[in-house]
Amino acid sequence: MAPHFARCFVLVPLLLLAACEPPDFGIGLATIESKAVGLGLRELPRATLRSIGLPYGLGVVRVEAAAASAGLRMGDVVYGVNQSRFKSAVDFARLLAEQPPGEPFALLVRRGANDLYFAVQPALPRQQPATSTLLRT
């Protein structure tokens, strides 16, 4: 069976979230890209989350620009924005979308056995058509 894409599409500023279902598992693992923050994230399997003691988190798979300047690294697990933990990729996208454009925010990250906050200063958004950012779930 070939993978297929989910049917729900929602526009969210600064983020691209794409979910597809692997043929063997029947569950979707979302990928999130944020050019303004310079961050690529991927949902983690439940077994991985259990092994690090988190109910939900997103693994860092790409670090550039503002995220790199803030100190994030590949392999970090992001599980909170400012003082709020999130429970899904959609919840994470909503929390970031609520941030005023260009305003700094904090990401709560698990790195090894340590929990750290990183202050991220995103790039100011350029004038782009509303369809330039897409959230797929």
Image (spheres, helix red, strand yellow):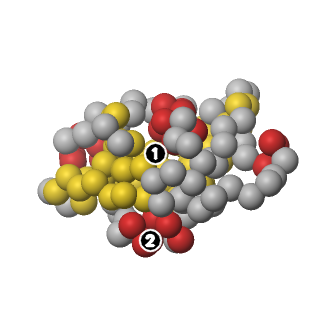
In depth, the one of 75 and 116 nearer the eye is 116
In depth, the one of 31 and 102 nearer the eye is 102
Residue 21 falls left or right of residue 119: right
Counting the numbered discs, the total is 2
* Quadrant of the snapshot with the C terminus: top right
Pick whichever of labels 2 and 1 is earlier in the sequence.
Answer: 1
Residue 81 falls left or right of residue 27: left
Q: CA distance from mark 2 to mark 1?
A: 20 Å
Q: Position of residue 81 (x, y in %)?
A: 39, 42
* Rendered position, 94 above or below 61: above
**Residue identifier under label 1:** 43
Mark 2 vs mark 1, foreground winner is: 2
Q: Residue at x 23, y 55 (%)?
A: 116
Q: In the structure shown, which secondary structural element does the residue marked by tag 1 occupy?
A: strand
* Rendered position, 124 above or below 94: below
In depth, the one of 2 and 37 nearer the eye is 37
Q: Position of residue 54 (x, y in %)?
A: 25, 39
Q: Which class describes the residues within 10 Å of circle 2: few (<14), some (14-19), or many (20+)? A: some
Residue 129 falls left or right of residue 73: right
Q: Is residue 27 visible?
A: no
